[in-house]
């Protein structure tokens, strides 16, 4: 009962045709296509940025612990030796 049937699509196309008119339909389809292309590119860049951040986070966490120098002076430096 809730499925989209063939006559639903026909009614939808007729309503769109009446709302926008025949000359505007190619322009409307072109703008929708461009918008979907931009959305797809942005989604890919977000997922690639996340993957790079995870990879960089894993690499820096492992090497940071071995390369860390103490930020506070040692006891010998504070006493004046």
Image: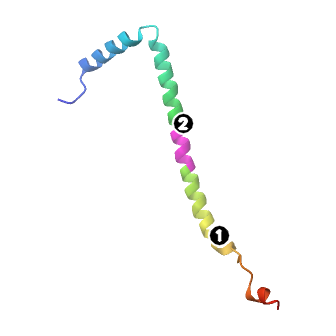
Single out the residue that lies furthest toward the front: 79
**SS of the residue under disc 2:** helix
Q: Is residue 46 above or below residue 76?
A: above
**SS of the residue under disc 1:** helix
- Residue 73 in percent (x, y) is at 74, 81
User: Which segment is the magenta one?
Assistant: 41-49
- Residue 79 in percent (x, y) is at 78, 90
Single out the residue that lies furthest toward the bottom: 81
Are the residues at dot 2 and dot 1 in contact (C-beta closer than 8 Å)? no
Q: Name which residue lies at 68% across and 73% down.
A: 68
Colour logic: rainbow
Whether 44 is among the magenta residues is yes
Q: Could you say which is closer to the camera, residue 7 or residue 15?
A: 15
Q: Is residue 58 above or below residue 71?
A: above
Decide which of tag 2 and tag 1 comes sooner along the chain.
2
Single out the residue that lies furthest toward the right: 81
Quarter occupied by the N terminus: top left
Quick check: 21 left or right of 73?
Answer: left
Q: Name which residue lies at 77% across and 86% down.
A: 78
Q: Main secondary structure of the magenta part?
A: helix
Quick check: 69 left or right of 57?
Answer: right
Assess disc 2: are there few (<14), some (14-19) or many (≥20) residues with their C-alpha within 10 Å of its C-alpha: few
Quarter occupied by the C terminus: bottom right
- Residue 17 in percent (x, y) is at 37, 11
User: Which residue was labeled with disc 2?
Assistant: 41
Assess disc 1: are there few (<14), some (14-19) or many (≥20) residues with their C-alpha within 10 Å of its C-alpha: few
Picture quadrant where residue 13 is located: top left
User: Which residue was labeled with disc 1?
Assistant: 64
Quick check: 49 left or right of 29?
Answer: right
Q: Name which residue lies at 54% across and 52% down.
A: 51
Quick check: 48 left or right of 14?
Answer: right
Q: Is residue 8 above or below residue 81?
A: above
């Amino acid at each position: 009962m809730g499925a989209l049937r063939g006559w639903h699509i026909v009614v939808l196309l007729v309503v769109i045709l009446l709302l926008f008119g025949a000359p505007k339909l190619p322009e409307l389809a072109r703008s929708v296509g461009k918008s979907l292309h931009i959305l797809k590119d942005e989604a890919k860049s977000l997922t690639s940025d996340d993957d790079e951040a995870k990879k960089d986070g894993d690499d820096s966490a492992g090497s940071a612990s071995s390369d860390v120098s103490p930020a506070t002076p040692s006891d010998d430096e504070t006493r004046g030796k």
